[in-house]
């Protein structure tokens, strides 16, 4: 068949749909196939292996101006901007024993960021820091978080190993009452929900999960006490890992070098591209002028205004990968802009499929066993699932001690004392690792948040997510949510979190400077934003046709307002700036206490 013929692409799209249908048929429950409720029989997967559990301290009862729920990049970015605005009274409440958020919890071997470090690590200008490598290790990222907290005096105001359980608005006093699992009761004028988009580890609802008699843990709770700091304790162990997403892709090569036998249990393969890795060029680092990262951010925001094809062809050399190059070869901007909408969609799909077939070719070139190579090929559109970049994952399957257990989209049937059951066969293991990711897209609803007249945020959201910029919600004054639904989605999430932190600081500064006790979006402003979210959710069946994953809520159908804002990043940033310049048009205020 002619590679460039419509029939060629249609045949591949049919294979995409077939693979998706297998996933839907065997796991029709969508997000309910996972649980984040890890107590009591699953509490071992929630325990923090990095710290002493519940080190004794007296409950805290005090009042602060701003309280941040969470201690990752969201909280740090907001707190830094508030410090710059002169806000001294800040409290950070963090479940972990240090700042860092995801990067505190993810300590697994091989952990690194899959976004260029010069863009991912925020506040590089402010910290006068240039990352060591093009893709930072988890250790470097955690160290950067710690350096930010030290520089802006955030450690002194932090409560670690503490989980917020309830956040309640006291209307007559215009304050939030925040309660924790350590008996704390803290009043705050403003609350920032900075839980993060990846903070709750999820475990699949596999029958018998608690029956396994070997050792097991989640990748976000890596147990070096069992594995050894260099995985030296695994040399005589049969190790299984469930999952082949971003974490597993980084972990598998490390386990392959250490375990006696490694079994990689796959339901859906990831798209694996080359990581153009290397140390930062010292000459380039020396050439950077003050404000260099801010300039990169502005360029990223500006690129969002261009069409998909223009973004591909004008991508900076630092970010060019195989997907970009494939698009450059198959699409001409001038020609593309003359096409009808239907033809544009077809051409974009063709370029997407061409890239995925290049991913398949790389697998064929690297993996020697033909059956394993075929099983590792992803059959879905690029960006249906988060793409991965790694240079050692595919070669790991050439090692004689590494075995791919391909469940062909079905997953693990059950878990028995000896190990997981796949296609009726028991896989006996010493160690079982869950690389099953995090619960995402629910920021702000992990604790019970009760606003005006006793309305709970979760109850309001049952009728459809309703916010302004994904940050504010009417009926919940002085509450700000970072990284939640109806906000912009960016592959480099810190770009988006920085814009949200900037906006929140501007709102709080405005309220302080004008003597306002509270700030709350107007009904019209919130309705306007909900309509924008709906209008920009897309007019194709892309999400429905994708294989299930967290990008499309595991294949669930959902209301058009219950997702991200899919307008351009520039339009998202400009919308917040417009609100900042016309506060009274977007918000209502009360007098200060």
Image: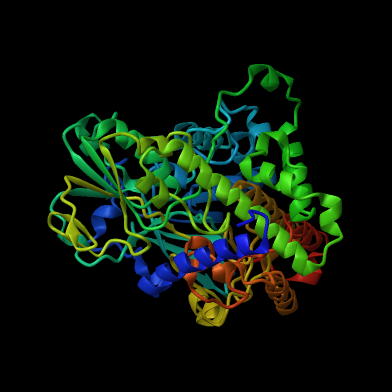
Decide if residue 290 is on the left or right side of residue 382.
right
Spot occupied by residue 270 in the image (x, y as percentages of width and height): 46, 50
Q: Is residue 318 above or below residue 464?
A: above
Closest to the observer, 161 or 186: 161
Residue sitting at x 42%, y 39%: 394
Residue 568 appears anywhere in the view = yes
Q: Nearer the viewer, residue 431 or 579?
A: 431
Circle count:
0
Q: Nearer the viewer, residue 516 or 548?
A: 548
Q: Which residue is pictured at 19% across the width and 42% down the height? A: 238
Q: Nearer the viewer, residue 426 or 521?
A: 426
Residue that lies at the very extreme toward the front in this rendered image: 1
Q: Quadrant of the N terminus?
A: bottom right
x 48%, y 52%: residue: 70
Q: Seen in the image, is 459 located left or right of residue 526? A: left
Residue 214, placed above or below residue 225: below
Task: Decide if residue 57 is on the left or right side of residue 538.
Answer: left
The scheme the figure's colours follow is rainbow
Q: Quadrant of the C terminus?
A: bottom right
Q: Position of residue 520 (x, y in %)?
A: 67, 70
Question: Which corner quadrant of the image does residue 110 belong to?
Answer: top left
Q: Looking at the picture, does residue 380 appear above or below residue 529?
A: above
Residue 435 on image: x %, y %: 35, 50
Depicted 377 relative to depicted 131: above or below: below
Q: Is residue 490 visible?
A: no
Please provide percent x and percent y for residue 89.
Answer: 57, 49
Instruction: Give the quadrant of residue 318.
Output: top right
Q: Residue at x 36, y 59 (%)?
A: 202
């Amino acid at each position: 068949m002619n590679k460039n013929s419509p029939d060629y692409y249609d045949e591949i799209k049919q294979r995409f749909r077939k693979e998706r249908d297998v996933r839907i048929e065997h796991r029709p429950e969508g997000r309910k196939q996972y649980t984040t409720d890890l107590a009591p029989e699953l509490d071992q997967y929630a325990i923090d292996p990095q710290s002493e559990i519940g080190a004794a301290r007296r409950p805290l009862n005090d009042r602060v101006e701003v309280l941040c729920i969470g201690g990752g990049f969201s909280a740090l970015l907001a707190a830094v901007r508030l410090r710059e605005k002169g806000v001294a009274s800040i409290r950070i409440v963090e479940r972990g024993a240090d700042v860092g958020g995801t990067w505190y919890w993810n300590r697994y071997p091989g952990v690194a960021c899959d976004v260029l470090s010069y863009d991912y690590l925020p506040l590089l200008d402010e910290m006068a820091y240039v990352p060591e490598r093009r893709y930072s290790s988890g250790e470097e990222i955690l160290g950067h978080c710690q350096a930010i907290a030290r520089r802006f005096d955030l450690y002194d105001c932090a409560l670690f190993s503490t989980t917020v359980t309830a956040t309640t608005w006291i209307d007559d006093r215009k304050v939030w009452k925040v309660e924790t699992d350590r008996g704390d009761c803290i009043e705050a004028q403003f609350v920032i929900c900075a839980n993060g988009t990846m903070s709750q580890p999820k475990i699949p609802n596999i029958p018998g999960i608690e029956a396994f008699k070997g050792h097991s843990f989640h990748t976000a709770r890596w147990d070096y006490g069992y594995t050894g700091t260099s995985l030296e304790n695994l040399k005589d162990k049969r190790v299984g890992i469930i999952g082949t997403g971003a974490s597993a892709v980084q972990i598998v090569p490390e386990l392959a070098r250490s375990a006696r036998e490694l079994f990689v249990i796959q339901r859906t393969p990831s798209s694996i591209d080359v990581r153009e890795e290397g140390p930062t060029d010292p000459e380039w680092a020396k050439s950077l002028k003050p404000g260099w990262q801010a300039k990169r951010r502005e360029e990223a925001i500006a690129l969002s205004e261009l069409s998909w094809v223009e973004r591909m062809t004008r991508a900076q050399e630092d970010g060019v990968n195989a997907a970009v190059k494939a698009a450059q070869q198959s699409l001409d901007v001038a020609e593309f802009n003359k096409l009808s909408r239907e033809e544009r969609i077809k051409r974009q799909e063709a370029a997407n499929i061409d890239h995925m077939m290049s991913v398949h070719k790389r697998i064929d070139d690297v993996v020697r066993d033909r059956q394993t190579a075929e099983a590792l090929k992803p059959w879905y559109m690029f960006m249906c699932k988060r793409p991965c970049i790694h240079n050692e994952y595919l070669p790991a399957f050439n090692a004689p001690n590494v075995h791919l257990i391909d469940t062909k989209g079905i997953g693990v049937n059950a878990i028995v004392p000896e190990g997981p059951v796949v296609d009726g066969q028991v896989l006996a293991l010493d160690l079982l690792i869950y690389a099953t990711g995090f619960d995402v897209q629910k920021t702000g609803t992990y604790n019970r948040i009760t606003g005006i007249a006793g309305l709970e945020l979760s109850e309001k959201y049952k009728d459809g997510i309703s916010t302004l910029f994904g940050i504010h919600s009417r009926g919940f004054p002085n509450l700000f949510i970072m990284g939640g639904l109806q906000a912009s989605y960016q592959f480099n999430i810190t770009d988006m979190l920085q814009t949200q932190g900037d906006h929140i600081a501007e709102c709080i500064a405005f309220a302080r400077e004008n003597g306002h006790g509270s700030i709350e979006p107007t009904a019209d402003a919130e309705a306007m934003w909900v309509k924008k979210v709906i209008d920009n959710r897309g007019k194709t069946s892309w999400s429905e046709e994708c294989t299930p994953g967290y990008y499309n809520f595991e294949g669930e159908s959902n209301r058009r307002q219950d997702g991200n804002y899919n307008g351009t990043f520039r339009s998202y940033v400009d919308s917040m700036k417009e609100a900042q310049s016309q506060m009274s048009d977007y918000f209502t205020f009360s007098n200060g206490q």
